[in-house]
Image: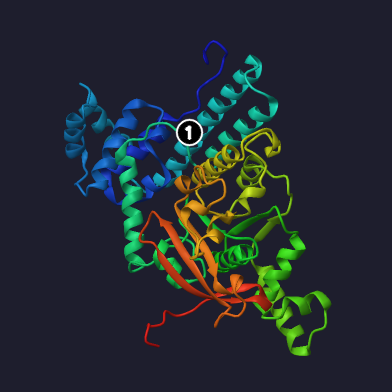
């Protein structure tokens, strides 16, 4: 078809040959090459087969040279009658591996051009077939272009050999952190150790009754992640305004009573601390959207445009518009709507490759029990929420129900579900004047 239309498929046979030839004559360049390219980037099938074979051999620590590669290609069933001669030709046309990275860049560029053309063809085809509404096609186009920009494909089968190296690198990273968390920090060491930080693609849920402090803990985590990672943190607030959220962040960072901030009656020392906190906050890359009518698709579209995204915070789930349509829940089941939103947020986390921290409201079910600590079944319109979430945490404060208790500001962060480890309870202290939480050391029962 391309030939009939006078179009030429973008690829460079010479660059592809130079890359695989370099890998054959100097195995030291292989780590640099596989960091830049994948098998699908090669247009010529013979070059792709050689690259895949070398990649698999490298992953298993095998010796790589023309003889061993040919033998492995025979074992893998991809060797042809002329494969041996072709390997010799590659050695001849590639006298040195010194320029392998510029050649790899050419291969990658041509591959991206082909993928871009394929995406454009599919979008154009759907437009002229009239399959779908304009908004749906725009969403599809954005997803496909984003996936190309992030070097990801949308679905499709991937050989396990190409996944091995990513898993191996993850294990190495965990070893380097001495068994600690490998994801973004929450700002609470004990919590990081329990859930191994906020990992890419994770959907983390923090649930509580209204006024228990879920927004505060969400902001605490957002600020800690932004400060430690130097990455962008996107906060979507469907309940509070941007100004209200920033007021809370300033209060917690400066340790100045939030009520005093609203009146502006501060001491000289408080003004000084406020100025320092404003400087710290301004140096972070926290983005806030307080549009109360947002859908998951809206959030996804905005986040795709962020180049250094590290974390998404949503406050809170039950206020979100139903999936895709933007209609209110009046026309559909609340349970089904929340389930759809939950599923879409998990998909968003995986697609963007970042953790999504979603705040949620608990039902009144816990208030009917003598022990009012939250349970998974207390999630409002829970449906698929607990199934989609990788981590579910509930906030409990005895002082919320009984102001006359011994320590009304003591709080518990209860890990109700944890795909990466055990459940349990972390002790915290609620600081109402700063609308903030701080972790406290575990105390022995006899203390």
Q: From where the camera sits, is residue 302 visible?
A: yes
Which quarter shows the C terminus?
bottom left
**Residue 255, how many percent across, how many down?**
66, 80
Location of residue 25 with respect to 216 vertically, above or below: above
Instruction: Tell me which residue sits at (39%, 45%) in the image.
Output: 100
Q: Position of residue 204 (x, y in %)?
A: 50, 55
Identify the secondary structure beneath mark 1: helix
Residue 379 in the figure: left or right of residue 170 = right
Q: Is residue 203 visible?
A: no
Quadrant of the image occupied by residue 207: bottom right
How many labels were placed on the picture?
1
Front-lying residue, 120 or 239: 239
Residue 253 vertical position relative to residue 245 in the rendered view, above or below = below
Q: Is residue 19 above or below residue 220?
A: above
Q: How is the image coloured?
A: rainbow
Q: Which residue lies at the image location 50% right of the left edge and 48% below the top edge?
A: 353
Q: Where residue 438 sits in the image (x, y, percent)?
A: 55, 76
Residue 100 in the figure: left or right of residue 134: left
> At which x and y percent is residue 37?
41, 41
According to the picture, the residue beneath numbered tag 1 turns out to be 111
Residue 187 or 400: which is nearer the viewer?
Answer: 400
Quarter of the figure with residue 434: bottom right
């Amino acid at each position: 078809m391309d030939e009939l239309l006078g179009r030429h498929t973008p690829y460079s046979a010479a660059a592809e040959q130079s890359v695989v030839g370099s890998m054959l004559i100097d195995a030291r360049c292989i780590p640099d090459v596989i960091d830049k390219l994948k098998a699908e980037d090669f247009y010529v099938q013979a070059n792709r087969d050689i690259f895949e074979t070398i990649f698999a051999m490298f992953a298993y620590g095998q010796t790589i040279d023309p003889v061993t590669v040919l033998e492995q290609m025979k074992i893998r069933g991809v060797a042809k009658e002329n494969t041996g001669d072709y390997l010799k030709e590659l050695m001849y046309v590639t006298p040195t591996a010194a320029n392998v990275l510029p050649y790899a860049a050419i291969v990658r560029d041509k591959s991206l051009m082909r993928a871009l053309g394929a995406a454009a063809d599919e979008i154009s085809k759907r437009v002229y077939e009239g399959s779908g509404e304009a908004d749906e096609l725009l969403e599809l186009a954005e997803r496909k272009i984003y996936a190309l920009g992030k070097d990801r494909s949308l679905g499709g089968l991937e050989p396990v050999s190409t996944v091995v190296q990513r898993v191996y690198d993850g294990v190495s990273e965990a070893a380097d952190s001495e068994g600690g968390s490998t994801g973004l920090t929450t700002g609470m060491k004990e919590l990081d150790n329990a859930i191994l930080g906020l990992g890419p693609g994770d959907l983390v849920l923090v649930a509580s009754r209204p006024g228990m402090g879920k927004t505060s803990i969400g902001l605490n985590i957002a600020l800690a992640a932004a400060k430690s990672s130097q990455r962008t943190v996107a906060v979507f607030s469907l309940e509070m305004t941007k100004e209200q959220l920033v007021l809370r962040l300033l209060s917690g960072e400066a340790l100045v009573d939030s009520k005093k901030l609203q009146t502006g009656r501060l001491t000289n020392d408080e003004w000084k601390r406020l100025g320092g906190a404003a400087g710290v906050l301004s140096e972070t890359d926290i983005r806030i959207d307080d549009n109360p009518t947002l859908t998951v698709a809206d959030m996804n579209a905005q986040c795709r445009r962020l180049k250094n995204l590290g974390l998404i915070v949503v406050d809170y789930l039950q206020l979100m518009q139903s999936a895709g349509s933007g209609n209110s829940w009046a026309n559909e089941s609340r349970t089904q709507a929340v389930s759809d939103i939950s599923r879409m947020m998990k998909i968003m986390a995986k697609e963007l490759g970042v953790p999504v921290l979603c705040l949620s409201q608990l039902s009144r079910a816990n208030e009917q029990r003598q022990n009012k600590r939250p349970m998974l079944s207390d999630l409002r319109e829970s449906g698929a929420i607990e199934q989609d979430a990788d981590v579910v945490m509930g906030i409990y404060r005895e002082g919320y129900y009984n102001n006359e208790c011994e320590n009304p500001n003591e709080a518990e962060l209860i890990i109700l579900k944890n795909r990466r480890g055990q459940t349990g309870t972390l002790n915290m202290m609620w600081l109402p004047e700063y609308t903030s939480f701080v972790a406290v050391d575990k105390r022995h029962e006899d203390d």
